[in-house]
Image (cartoon, grey):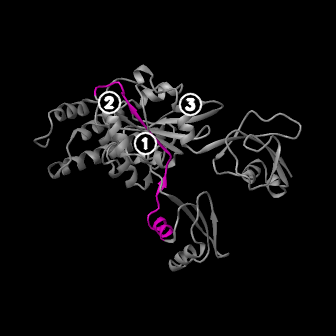
Amino acid sequence: MVTNLPPQCAGLEKRYREAKTLSEKAAALVEYMAAIPRHKGTEKLLQQLKTRHAKILAQLESERRRRGSGGSGGKYAVKKEGAAQVIILGPTAVGKSMLLASLTHARPQILGRPFTTTEPIPGMMQYEDVQIQLVEAPALMEGANEGVGWGPRVLSLARNSDGLILMVDLSDNPLAQLDMMVNELRAVHIEVVERGGKVEVQSRENGGVQIIPFSGFDGDFEEIRGALRGRGIYHALVKVWGQIAAEDVLSFLDHPMLHKPTLVVANKADSVGASDKLKVLKQEFPELQVISTSLLGRAGLEKLPGLVFNSLRIMRVYTKRAGQEASTRPIIVRTDSNVLDIARIIHKEFYEEFKFAKIWGSSKYDGEKVGGGYILHDRDILEIHA
């Protein structure tokens, strides 16, 4: 073992060597690596441990395939259910398992020791008449994007999700924890803070450059077309949101980042010095919504389902037939969706033969007649005529 390691490393190495199952060895090895300081003198040891950990994960994957439980490519795969899938990320022992157990019927192991969770654990959270899937991920740690711990698998979960909850511990160093997670996500092109605008460019074979503006856009179409032509893009469908200029379009092309709606849950709000740490956290990350909780006392939990739903920027639309009551099961769509988006979801004929619709909810009066471009709001009731 490398000299000058922290005292706890000897015990962690012993725990790894005495672990009886592959899962226990993987968890112990992750804990051991997390305790090793990162500097030139430990580079070789860390690389050896990463290689060893990768081999153990490959053995576990092989065993799962033999048992017929699937799994491929060294990635976690959690089937999406409900209105959206939100991944709970955080360092070890910040309360991820307790949060999942508090908000869903899932029963993860809560053993009071680090690295208990070694596989993603899903559960369904109820918010009014909507269910949202929460998935607790194994611990995220520094170096995850380079293969430390379960890093690549956990980050792949984040990439495939609809939103994220980043958990920190107010009894520890929450600012360093949040910094680490934001940096690890950014290293794999996942952004938790949305830029001032957004661009989607879909190449096509003909038709020139067609620009579709959404909420907040006030840029110059010809400047954007010129910028794209300068890159050799002559035929494309370009969707733009917010304050986007020509140079911003090029920036998005050069550095594509995937934005994930994100909440920060700061646990152990009743610990010593927690209020001051919470204040610093909000000052350093003003763009992120930070919610303080004390999970042992269930403080701060009651508002979380609604905050998660709102952060996802989704809404409920209920449909009805003429002369009948509205459906009790909503259609879940993005908050910028219009009437024609719903018509397309219901049936191709409703979209192609659309005439008009009637709206209850956000309209000026009940049953107001509107066109296909009408932007809907949460809880609207829609009656489509084709």
Residue 374 coordinates in the image, percent (x, y) = 74, 52
Q: Which residue is mark 1?
A: 61
Helix, strand or loop under label 1 = helix
Mark closer to the chain start, 3 or 1: 1
Q: Is residue 271 magenta?
A: yes
Q: CA distance from mark 1 to mark 2?
A: 40 Å
What amino acid does circle 3 point to?
Answer: Met
Label ID, residue 159:
none
Q: Position of residue 45 (x, y in %)?
A: 19, 47
Q: Which mark, residue 125?
A: 3
Q: Does residue 94 appear left or right of residue 14 in this picture?
A: right
* Range covered by the magenta-colored residues: 247-272
Q: Nearer the viewer, mark 1 or mark 2?
A: 2
Left or right: residue 60 versus residue 53 is: right
Could you tell which of marks 3 and 2 lies nearer the N-terminus? 3
Instruction: Identify the residue position indicated by label 2 in the image.
Output: 274
Amino acid tagged 1: Glu
Q: CA distance from mark 3 to mark 2?
A: 27 Å
Mark 3 vs mark 1: in front = 3
Residue 337 seen in the current view: yes
